[in-house]
Amino acid sequence: MSSLQGADRFAAFRHVSYTRFFFARFLASFAIQIVSVSVGWQMYAQTQNTLYLGLIGLFQFLPSLALILVTGSVADRYNRRAIVSICMVISALCAAALLALTLADAFTPWPVFAILIVFGIERAFMAPAVQSLAPNLVPPRDLSNAVAWNSSSWQTAAILGPVAGGLLYGVSAIVAYSLALGFLVLSSILVLMIEKPVQRVLREAASWSSILAGFRFIRSEKVVLGAISLDLFAVLLGGAVALMPVFASDILVLGPLGLGLLRAAPGIGAIAVAIVLATYPIRHRAGVLMFTGVALFGVGTVIFGLSQVAWLSIAALMLMGAADMISVYVRETLIALWTPDAVRGRVNAVNMVFVGASNELGEFRAGTMAHFIGAVPAVVIGGVGTLVVSVIWALGFPQLRRIDSLDVPAHIVERPEAADPTAVL
């Protein structure tokens, strides 16, 4: 990475299409955070059942798993910008459906779960497309800067969205869902305004060999395999988001606004680190820093689980967000740089299933464990598990641990077709 990029913290925004993409993603993420807080709080308020909180995550994850062989190929074969726009429209329709249920006083678990399944299907198609679209909007020299700003966009939404969701839900669930709906519509319009990017489209006939190319690439590229699987198991064990309504309501006694503050705390830590990384990108010992971030995430999770005072809980969540930002920055940059564009959609489809497993399935893990052993033990055990995972993966993937700089690897710079599984199909 050149010294010029290190000095130009806004390098990615020199490209108009990326700027539109950035704000579209921010608005969509903001809206999803509002919906997430509102659905979780509304569900717990009506059922008082932690198992239902876990099912919220499970029903959003299952479509990604079921469609993993389809979504990545779609992102590689068709216009990624169009896919993202269509998916955002579907998100808006889901928000409208939740609003309609609330207006009709018909917000009950199973209709809501049905809507969340549609949400999950939409996200299954959008995730690989949106992850693959960003590298098409900036040149390679600005990619790590774009990754940092992408993360800061999501994390800013993670700060403001939960707070807004808690405030708006405190006023009315109708107001919360209405605002989310408006943001999703606007994000769809912004995506349509992006000029059609240059994209290497997969031309060959569909076959099992081409469909499985993403899996084949990940298996052969140990750096990508280690980065993806590390996130899967670390967050699967360490995630505590699903149980925040329980902590806000029963342990810390904070109410809806307090839930918003808890949900925002990881984002506050993450956005602070993201801004630093956009200005001073990681130049050395990237692999070690990624594993350190995962370990600190586990430490923060344990502290949060044991805390019974609001300020310590919020501080622990901020630590979790800051540590996760370091890990996410390194991981997403490595995946983007080490993956050829022709197979990027299929690789990102697998990555997004792993991310979904770590988030939504992690929420199911937390909710189920809390149902049987209590919320506090469920969170603490998960945090300890994350610490163990960081050590095992650091020892099991020495290539990943030894990664020094976040530059395009030589084998892709010199012979990109050598790293492209589709070239030998």
Image (cartoon, rainbow, N blue to C red):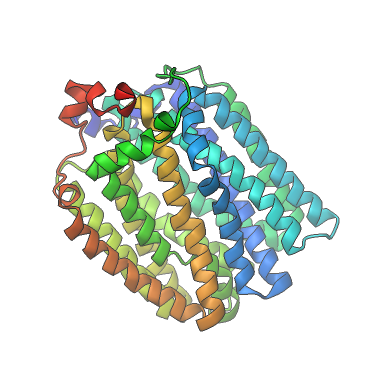
The residue sitting at 14% across, 43% down in the picture is: 404
Q: Is residue 424 visible?
A: yes
- Where is residue 224? Give x, y as percent: 28, 43
The answer to whether residue 124 is above or below residue 79 is below
Quadrant location of the N terminus?
A: top left
Point out residue 87 in the picture as x, y percentages from the top left corner.
Answer: 61, 35
Q: Write the residue at 38% across / 55% down.
A: 232
Question: Could you say where residue 118 lies in the image, as x and y percent from the top left?
Answer: 66, 46
Residue 103 against residue 24 in the figure, above or below: below
Residue nearest the viewer, comparing 187 with 338: 338
Report how many numbered discs are placed on residues in the image: 0
Q: Quadrant of residue 336?
A: top left
Q: Is residue 51 left or right of residue 198?
A: right
User: With 239 as the anchor, is 389 left or right in this view?
Assistant: left
Image quarter of residue 408? top left
- Residue 163 to residue 30: above or below: below
- For residue 280, say whether it is visible: no
Residue 377 location in percent, x, y?
Answer: 44, 80
The C terminus sits in image quarter: top left
Asked if residue 153 lies left or right of residue 339, the reply is: right
Give the side of residue 280 with respect to residue 107, left or right.
left
Q: Give the residue at x 56% y 57%.
A: 162
The quadrant holding residue 220 is top left
* Residue plotted at (26% across, 62% down): 390
